[in-house]
Amino acid sequence: MKLFMNTSLTAPDMASLFNLVLDMKGRRLTTKWLLNLRLSRHEAIMIRLLKAGRSMEEIADKLDMSVKSLYRKRTVLSERLGAGNFNEACLFIFKNKLLDAVGNDP
């Protein structure tokens, strides 16, 4: 903090510069974050079928992929949403109605 205060910029200049940096960084982070909130068609189908009580084997068969690939897809989704695990990711998806933004095919 001391290094930041020992500059030759005046307080208003520093405030303007600081606000500009925050604004630009916020725009980039917000855009990236919003893109991460979109569910792919496969992700939406997977979540809907899990919610309906289907097994991972049934879902993998429906999506024409291996069970291992489906588990990997779950992990990638959780990481992308910043959730600690898949259950947290599902709670986030349901709470924020992300399934509603994707079509209704099962």
Image (tube, rainbow, N blue to C red):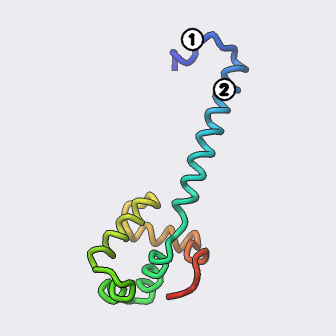
Residue 26 on image: x %, y % = 61, 43
Three-letter code for the amino acid on which mark 1 is drawn: Asn
Q: Position of residue 71 (x, y in %)?
A: 31, 73
Tell me the residue at 56%/72% (across/down): 98
How many callouts does the rendering have? 2
- Helix, strand or loop under label 2: helix
Q: Which numbered dot is residue 78? A: none
**Amino acid on which disc 2 is placed:** Leu
The residue most toward the front is 64
Task: Sort mark 1 into few (<14), some (14-19) or many (20+) by Cα contacts within 10 Å.
Answer: few
- Helix, strand or loop status at disc 1: loop
Q: Residue at x 55, y 71 (%)?
A: 95
Q: Quadrant of residue 103?
A: bottom right
Taking the spot 69% from the left edge, 14% from the top edge, the residue there is 10
Residue at the farthest left position = 68
Q: To which quarter of the image does residue 97 belong?
A: bottom right
**C-alpha gap between disc 1 and disc 2:** 15 Å
Q: In the rendering, which numbered label is found on residue 6? A: 1
The mark nearer the N terminus, 1 or 2, is: 1
Residue 55 in the image: x percent, y percent?
33, 87
Depth check, front residue: 87 or 39: 39
How many residues crowd mark 2 within 10 Å: few (<14), some (14–19), many (20+)?
few
Label 1 vs label 2, nearer the camera: 2
Image height of 9 relative to 24, above or below: above
- Asked if the residues shown at circle 1 and circle 2 are in contact, with their CB atoms under 8 angstroms apart, the answer is no
Which residue is label 2 attached to? Answer: 17
Horizontal side of 16 relative to 82 (left or right) equals: right
- Residue projecting furthest to the right: 12
Where does the image place residue 11, in percent across and percent down from the top left?
69, 18
Of the pair 27 and 86, the residue shown nearer to us: 27
In the drawing, does residue 60 fall left or right of residue 102? left
